[in-house]
Image (cartoon, rainbow, N blue to C red):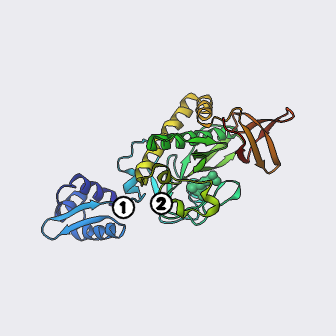
Amino acid sequence: MDEEILQLLREHSSDFLSGEEISRHLKVSRTAVWKRMRRLKTLGYEIEASTRSGYRLIRSPDLLTPAEVRLGLKTKRIGKRVHHFRTLDSTNSKAYQLALNGAEEGEVVIAESQEKGKGRLGRQWFSPPFLNIYISVILRPKIPPHQASLITLMAAVATADAIRNFSGLLPVIKWPNDILLRDRKVAGLLNEIHSEVDRIHFVILGIGVNVNMDEKMLSKEIRTVATSLKIETGQTVSRKDFLQSLLLELERWYAMFSEEGGAVILEAWRDRAHIKGKQVKVTSFGGILIGKAIDVDLDGALLLETEDGTRKRVVAGDVEYKTKT
Ligand code: BTN
């Protein structure tokens, strides 16, 4: 009902809408309308109320509630159902549970903050409230499990493109799927998969984007390696607008992958990663490797040529660029 009331108020934002009109439209009592208005105010909506004229929406908070996210969202599938939480341990864990219980492709879990946001390689993802975007998207691709990495590459491309479209800046993807602006991480992806030997049940695309964090909010250790859209553009960004554009890019690239296959995704990923020929140092569970990046293969693994000319294939790890190209 929040969504319907907000839509009505927005359609009449230049004048008041009487309680009676609203109750007639939504087929609920005037007391129910009044209670809803009170609830919306506690959520941060500024609503002018006059006993004679009714209600008028003055300002909406930058919240990522279903009512906010779905209004004006141009996707067909992704984000059409939104599960919103003030806080969660991790949106990925919640989405995983929902998917096990039958949630459909395209459902999105959003949290305003995370207590134990999951990062790559067992790290924690810094998730303070109301500043950034923490989402998990449920996908049910009809592909064999060995192609799951392509979904991760696809999501990295979509996130990079949403950032580019939104900020006008040119993000770079760092293997495997960090999104960088000025060599600092602005977004990270952690995807989880549930499958059997020859079939994927679902993929959870976990995406964290640093949106409105200021430099002073970042700890000393993070400050040199992380950034946010606000730090880079010098402007506060509407999280809702950015999220809508991110969901649209995800839908666009996912459709491209489903219709045209992995080669298009790999090409787009290469275009945005500029990794070929770079001298890199990779820290992985197997130790440290130094060499020249050759490419990324269809499984998303990094192909390296070490100093003695041997070729190595790295499936997980952290990359540092030794030289810039
Ligand atoms: C990384 O370490 O680069 C990956 C970070 C991924 C963070 C996002 S925030 C939303 C989703 N839920 C999680 O618990 N993690 C991902």
Q: Quadrant of ligand 1?
A: bottom right
Q: If you read the primary sequence from the N terminus, does the residue marked by circle 1 or circle 2 appear first?
A: 1
Residue on which disc 1 sits: 61
Residue on which disc 2 sits: 131
Q: Position of residue 167 (x, y in %)?
A: 45, 44
Count residues near mark 1 (Cα–Cα under 10 Å), then give few for <14, some for 14-19, many for 20+.
Answer: some
- In the image, what residue type sits under mark 2? Leu
Q: Residue lying at the far left in this picture: please name it.
A: 52
- The label shown at residue 292 is none
Q: Position of residue 229 (x, y in %)?
A: 49, 51
In the image, taking residue 48 as reference, residue 81 lies left or right, namely right
- In the image, what residue type sits under mark 1? Pro
Q: Nearer the viewer, mark 1 or mark 2?
A: 2
Give 46 or 289, whichever is nearer the viewer.
289
Question: Residue shown at 28%/54% (left/top)?
Answer: 7
- Total number of numbered discs in the rendering: 2
Indicate the quadrant where residue 221 lies. bottom right
Give 44 or 276, whichever is nearer the viewer.
276
